[in-house]
Amino acid sequence: MINNNTLTMINKINYMKEKHYINNEVYSLNNSNSNKWQPTYKFLLDLDYIINEIKKNSFIGINLFDILESCEKNNPNWDVDYTISKSDIEWFNSDKGRYYFLTPLLDNIKSTEEYRMALIFHTDLIGLFELHLHN
């Protein structure tokens, strides 16, 4: 029979394994050679707003539109009246862009499910940026 202390220790070990895996996945992105594209300063400022709003919330039970709406309400400097460049999108879609997006979120990611949600947010943002580019 497994007692509560043993079960707690097993849960901690599993959590540490998940966290180690996620950290290794994210940090490996920074070692890629995807320096072909460079983001604009304004694009990085907006990404920082989005990342900070994600960090304020739980990953589970929210969607990207909730995050973007929160950015608009909470940041007086939020400005979407500029044009996102193809270079911004290509950079964000590269390993360097994923690294930039995921690294500040690592402390908030507590499970592989939350890591998966962060990746979904990244993919959804790429889709929204591409729509902006084509309009």
Image (cartoon, helix red, strand yellow):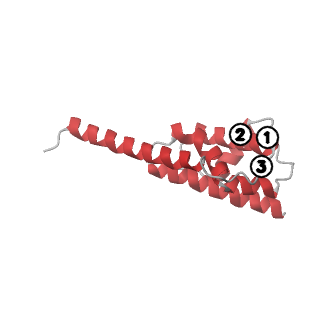
For the C terminus, the quadrant is bottom right
Q: Which residue is mark 1?
A: 78
Mark 3 and mark 2: Cα distance apart in space = 19 Å
Going from N to C along the chain, the mark reached first, 3 or 2, is: 3
Residue lying furthest right: 82
Q: Quadrant of residue 104?
A: top right
Give whichever of 2, 93 is nearer the camera: 93
Q: Give SS at disc 2.
A: helix
Amino acid tagged 1: Trp
Q: Is residue 57 visible?
A: no
| Amino acid at the residue labelled 3 | Gln
Circle 3 residue: 38
Q: Position of residue 34 (x, y in %)?
A: 68, 54
Viewport quadrant of the N terminus = top left
Figure check: 27 above or below 122: above
In the rendering, at what x and y percent does residue 48 appear? 70, 40
